[in-house]
Image (tube, grey):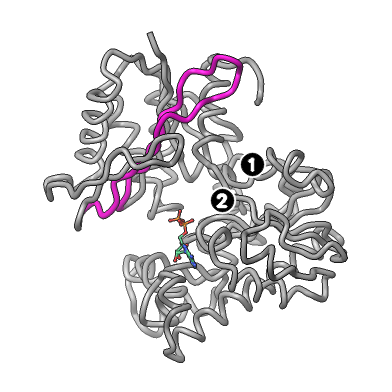
Amino acid sequence: MDEYAVIINAGSSSLKFSVFRRPESNAWRLEVRGQIEGIGTRPQFSAKNEAGQSVADEQLDAAVNDGRTALAYVADWMRERYGGARVRGIGHRVVHGGARYTGPTIVTPEVLDDLRTLIPLAPLHQPYNLAAIEAVWERLPDVPQVACFDTSFHRGQPAVAELVPLPSEIRNTGVQRYGFHGLSYEYIASVLPSVAPGIANGRVIVAHLGSGASMCALKNGKSVDSTLGFTALDGLCMGTRPGAVDPGVILHLFQSLGLSAKEVETMLYKKSGLLGISGISNDMRALLASTEPAARLAVDYFVYRAAKEIGALAAVLGGIDGLVFTAGIGENSAEIRKRICQASAWLGIELDDESNARKGPRISTTASAVSAWVIPTNEELMIARHTGLLLGLIEQRV
Ligand code: ADP
């Protein structure tokens, strides 16, 4: 009987899933990956097989209006496609693991309770991640579930990088810098030895530029600092999040403008960043296509902030050997890569326009002192590897 592991990445308006076949030679084989987007508005289901060919693409009934109904739809679709197959484990992306979860963890009711306490630190993701775990439990109570955290890869950073310089009674309640996008960075670190062996053991900045955006400073494949901190609000300008803001501005929102905590939370997570600056869109494609001055300002700020953070992380690393772009914007926008590389030319980065246009993977000239790369991320594969390892389905890291 065929055996599978299912990977779930549940968000507020989308449910992404991948099905991996049980490894025969310690390597997972992707069978299918798909998603339901527009949950709550206009749900659309699509899936592709390993070769990238579409195997499903359909508009769903509006009754698919939350994570639970979306998961039920995907489960029924899988049953039809893989009827009789055995699901050996389910791996979930969980955004926040706090200080306690320094690696992937098998979910128990106690673990779930613990993870719920972190919901206020990641309101955009954590509730949906956990709801998916609960929904799977109801349907498949005997299948082990593994939570893989976006924060774990960053544990082990130097104390100064994790510090939030507030009084100890506050820090003792778990107020520290955690960092996010760790599954993406861990995946990139895992492929550097084969894709870019010359920098794999060196000082590398990885720029994960998607709707959420951050950068990670890697030294010898380990995270030593990153631009996201206690929550996923710090650092770079993002689709709807501002990135670093003077905390005095937040005090002003409360004290002078009288905004409620909920209003401030909504502003910081959903109305700022590219959307807030442009007033047009949180989508980089739309902003690059627009001639509106506000759209240009949003793109300019995105690039400015990225270059500034590269400078800061280069200082942390004492210079850099390589710069890697990944995620939606990083993998697909030659223009943004070009502008960030130009702004970082002082570090010794010289872009090769032709390689940049065809996504490299190496996009710097051979003469460039610091190499630049485009490497597609694969958080699902990272979760599959962790799930397999933890459940004893594979014996060693592949
Ligand atoms: P997430 O997984 O965080 O939702 P993604 O990594 O999918 O986000 O990235 C989404 C972002 O990538 C959006 O801002 C989108 O506009 C941008 N993006 C995708 N393709 C392109 C492209 N060709 N040019 C510019 N931006 C792009």
The amino acid beneath tag 1 is Glu
| Observer-nearest of 79 and 306 | 79
On the picture, is 223 further left or further right than 211? right
Numbered circle sitting on residue 381? none
Disc 2 or 1, which lies upstream in sequence?
2
Task: Say if 7 sits above or below 305 in the image.
Answer: above
Is 303 in front, or is 147? 303
Q: CA distance from mark 2 to mark 1?
A: 11 Å
| Residue at (61, 52) in percent of width and height | 176
Q: Quadrant of residue 55?
A: top left
Left or right of 161? Residue 105 is left
Q: Residues within 10 Å of mark 2 (few under 14, many from 20)?
A: many
Q: Is residue 344 visible?
A: yes
Image position, residue 306 (x, y; %):
64, 70
Residue 192 versus residue 227: which sits nearer the camera? Answer: 192
Q: Which residues are magenta?
A: 13-40
Task: List x then y, in percent, for residue 79.
Answer: 25, 23
Residue located at (40% from left, 71% from top): 282
Disc 2 secondary structure class: loop
> Where is mark 2, residue-wise?
180
Q: Position of residue 312 (x, y in %)?
A: 74, 68
| Element assignment for label 1 | helix
Q: Is 335 located above or below residue 14 in the figure?
A: below
Residue at screen point 59% across, 73% down: 335
Can you tell which quarter of the image residue 389 is in?
Answer: top right
Q: Residue at x 42, y 32 (%)?
A: 7
Front: mark 2 or 1: 1
Which residue is label 1 attached to? 186
Q: Residues within 10 Å of mark 1 (few under 14, many from 20)?
A: many
